[in-house]
Image (spheres, rainbow, N blue to C red):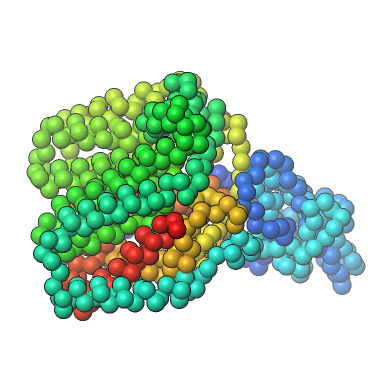
Amino acid sequence: MLALKRGPSTALAAAAVLAALLFGAWVAASPAFPLLRPMSGALWLRHAEPFELASRSLGRSKRHFRRRFVLPVRIERARFSVAAMRMARISLDGAVIFASPSPRSWKRTFRVAGPVEAGAHELMAEVESVDGPPLFVLRSEDMDVSSDPRWESSSDGNAWEPAAPARGPARVPLRDAFPSAGEGAAACLPWLIPVFLAALVISTGAIRAPASIGPGAVRWTLLAAWLVLALNNLFKLPWNAGFDAGYHVEYIAHVARHWRLPLATEGWQMFQSPLYYLTAAPFYAAAEAHGGLFAAGYAVRCVSWLCGAAQIELTYRVVRSVFPSRPGLQSAGVVIGGLLPMNIYMSQTASNEPFAAALTAAALAFAVGMHARAPGRPADGHWLVLGGLLGLALLSKVSAALVIAPLLWHLRPGPKALIKTAAVALAFCGWYYLRNWALLGSPFIGGWDPGRGMGWWQDPGYRTLGQLLFHGEALRSPVYSGIYGLWDSLYSSLWLDGWLSGIITVRSRPPWNYHLLAAGAWLALVPSAAILWGFSKAVGGKAPRSVRLSALCLAVYALALTVLYLKLPVYSTAKASYTLGLVPCYATLACSGLEGIWEKPLLRGIALGWIACWAAAAYGAYFIL
C-alpha cells in the first residue's frame, strides 16, 4: 500500500525533473535566451565598464579584445574554439581567421585550425552587439592564449586595459549609501528587544491576552494602521515615486482627458491592460479640475491604498477558511500577509500592480471559499462570480493568467462549469486582447516587445549560471542586492524595497526609514522559514488542499519569473512584486509552516516574538517621519 501511495507522487517528481532537464537544455541551446554557455578552460570576457543602473537604448556597440603572446616553436595545426555574443571577427596578426555567420549563431561554438609560426603574435577579437555588452570566449587546445584576465580590451581600439570576466556585476556605488542588514539590526535592537519580550510573554501564556484580541480584531487593527500610514505618507512621498509611476500617471491622464484607450505604441506603460487606468481616471480628472496636475498625481494613489487594504481583508478570509479552528494561526497569518513589505511599499504609489494583485487575490480567496463551503459541488452562481473575478484580473494585467491552472487543479470543474467560468471571464477581458490582435498583430504585448518601437536594455545584458544562485547579498547589504542574481532580487523585493521603488540616485531615494528597512532582511528569516516549511509540507502532500493550492501558485509564479529572468537579461527583471497577487498564499504557507510548533509554547513564543519584531520593523520602515 505504501508503494502504491508513493507511486503517483514519485512519478510526478520524476516528470518534473525530466521537464526541468528538457527546459534547461532548451535554454542552453536557444539563442533567444542570453545565457552564456561555459567553455572548459576559458572565460567569457567583457570590457571592464561600470555597472550602469540607467536604461539604455538599443544601438550597435563594438569592443576590441587582444592577447599578445610569443610562440617558441611553429605549430602546424593550431586549433581554436570560439563563441561570441553577438557577432565577432577573430584575427591573428591582422589576418581574419574567423567571422560570425549571423547574430543568431552566437551560442554555437566554432572551431578554427591553421598553422602558426614561431615568434611574437597578436590575437585580436572585434565583437559587436546591439542589445547588450559585446562578449566573447576563446579556447586554444595548443597554445596558452585561452580567454582569461591576461587579455586586454578597448572601446575604441586605442586605449587598452585588462579585460573583465563576464561573471558578477561590478561595484555599484549607490549601494554604499545605505546601511547593511547588520547595521540596521544593531540600530534597531534597543527597541526590538522589548517588542520581542512582550510578544514572547503573551504568546507563551505567562500573561493572558484579552479574549477579544482574535484574528478579527487583528484584521481591524491592521486596517486602521494602514489608513494611518496612508494618510501620513500622502504628501511626504513625491507624487511620482514608484516603479515607472510617472508613466502610469501619463496613461491615466490620457484616459481622463481623451476617454480613449491608447495603443501599446503610444507610451512607455501603455502596453498595460486598461482596467486600472480606467478606474483611476475619474480620481485624476476630479483632482486635476480642482487642484491641478500635482493634486491629480497624488489622488490616483487612493486606488492603490484601497487595493493594499483589500489584501489585508482577503488574507484574513483565506486563513480563516483554511485554518477554521486555529484562531492563533489565523492571527499570525493576517499579520504576515497584511504587513508583507512589498504590499506596503507598492500600494503607496501609482501602479497597476496593486490593482491587478487585489483582483487576483480576490479570485484566489473566492476559490478557497468555494471549496471550503461545498467541496466538489460549488453552486452554479459561484462559477460565474469566479469567472468575473478572473476576467477583471486579466483586464488589469495579463499575468493573472498564471493562477488559472492552479485554480483548475484546486476546483476541478466539470465541462459545464468550465465553460461558464471561461465565458464570463472572456466577456470581461476578451475584447481588449482581440483589439490588440486586430490593431497590433498580437493579443499580448510586453514592455520589451520590439514591435512597440521602444527598444531598450539594462545591465548586465546577459545571464550566467551563477545568477541563478542565491549569493546572500540580500542578507548582507540588501539595497540593490538584486543585481547579483535571481534569488537575491526576489528576497530583497519581497521583504523590503530593495529596488528603492525604481530610483537609481541617492538624492531622489524614497524617504523610507532605512535602518528599519535594512533590518527587515534579517528579521524576515523566520517568516521566510515558515513559508518554506509550509511549501515543503504542501509538496510532500502533508497539507490541506488549499495550502497545496498556495504552494502551486507560488511554484507557477516562480517558474514564470525564472523564464522571464532568463529571457530578459536586465537587472530589474525579477521583482517579487510581480507575485503581489499571492499575498494570501504567502500567509497561508506561513501558517502551515508554523502549525508544527504551535502546541510547543516556548518555540511558539520565540517564533511569534521574532515575527512581532519583523512586523514592527516592516510597518515602521515605510512610515515616513
Q: Residue furthest front?
A: 290
- In screen coordinates, is 161 left or right of 222? right
Query: Where does residue 370 sit, x and y in percent of width and height?
Result: 15, 43
Which residue is at the front of the view, 506 or 542? 506
Look at 9% across and 43% down and name the residue there: 374
Query: Where does residue 9 sit, x and y in percent of width and height?
Result: 24, 58
Which residue is at the front of the view, 488 or 81? 488
Look at 16% across and 76% down and name the residue there: 207
Query: Where does residue 66 sit, x and y in percent of width and height?
Result: 80, 60
Above or below — where is 31 with respect to 213? above
Where's the C terminus, which quadrant?
bottom left
Above or below — where is 565 with respect to 254? below
Name which quarter of the figure residue 199 lies in: bottom left
Look at 28% across and 30% down and name the residue there: 425
Which residue is at the front of the view, 547 or 516? 516
Name which quarter of the figure residue 359 lies in: top left
Query: Where does residue 268 sit, x and y in percent of width and height?
Result: 55, 35
- In screen coordinates, is 364 left or right of 161? left
